[in-house]
Amino acid sequence: MTPWTEIASVAVLGLGANTENLPVGLAYGLARRRIGLPRNLLIAAVTTAATLLPLIAGRDLRHLALTPAPDILGGLLLVALGLFNVWRERRGRRVAGPAVAPAPARAAIGLRETLVLAAGLSLNNIGLGFAGGIAGLGALPVTLSVAGFSVALLWLGEWLSGRATHTPGALAWLPIDGNLLLVAVGVLVMLGA
């Protein structure tokens, strides 16, 4: 493997391990839920560990790299999280009554939700880690790539949602609920997309 091939492989692995992070960050932003830097770093640590452990074991456990179970479990967690958030929002609206209130401030997600989100985003990385281990990619470059893309893409999704919601009429043509987007991402993960 040439150095350029290894650099490209590490970058693609880092990006591939975090493709869900952009729409998840967007979904949380649209749902007026803030992930924030400390939670983002925790999610990056979990997703990186979930990639590195299989990467290290990849040479010995080659036959497990093809199992679809991590994608299915990760997708189910994302779908469950999105549906739970929809239920919680609907329940909150019933309690609040029909009066129109100003838009609530962006509430930060809690530690439990952060860990569930991290698990959902990291389970599909197991197969990528095995593949990287089989390909002989180094642990340090993969760590930097996976963690860097995780933080950057979650932040970018939140930032884009903030820009869209602060621009009058930016989302008027797009009838999207951030939690339903999270469910859709979970379904796509389960399908291996």
Image (cartoon, grey):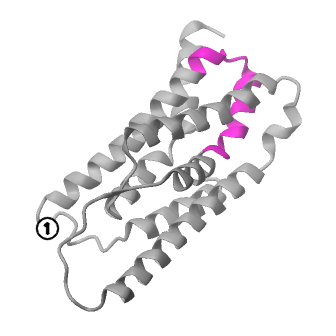
* Left or right of 156, for residue 103: left
Question: Residue 83, image x and y in percent?
Answer: 53, 72
Q: Which residues are magenta?
A: 122-142
| 173 is higher (above) or lower (below) than 21 | below
Q: Nearer the viewer, residue 98 or 11?
A: 98
Q: Decide: is 4 above or below 16.
A: above
Whether the magenta-drawn stretch holds residue 126 is answered as yes
Name the residue located 17 percent from the left edge and 63 percent from the top edge.
Answer: 170
Q: Position of residue 93 (x, y in %)?
A: 35, 83
Residue 11 seen in the figure: no
Q: Secondary structure at mark 1?
A: loop
- Residue 53 at x, y percent in the picture: 73, 29
Q: Outermost residue toward the bottom?
A: 98
Quadrant of residue 134 within the rendered picture:
top right
Q: Residue 80 versus residue 189: which sits nearer the camera?
A: 80
For mark 1, what is the residue? 169
Q: Residue at x 30, y 90 (%)?
A: 97
| Residue drawn at point x = 59 percent, y = 38 percent | 47
Residue 51 vertical position relative to residue 113 in the rendered view, above or below: above
Quarter location, residue 72: bottom right
Quadrant hosting residue 106:
bottom left
Magenta stretch: includes residue 52: no
Q: Which residue is at a point 21% across and 57% down the rendered structure image?
A: 164
- Amino acid tagged 1: Gly
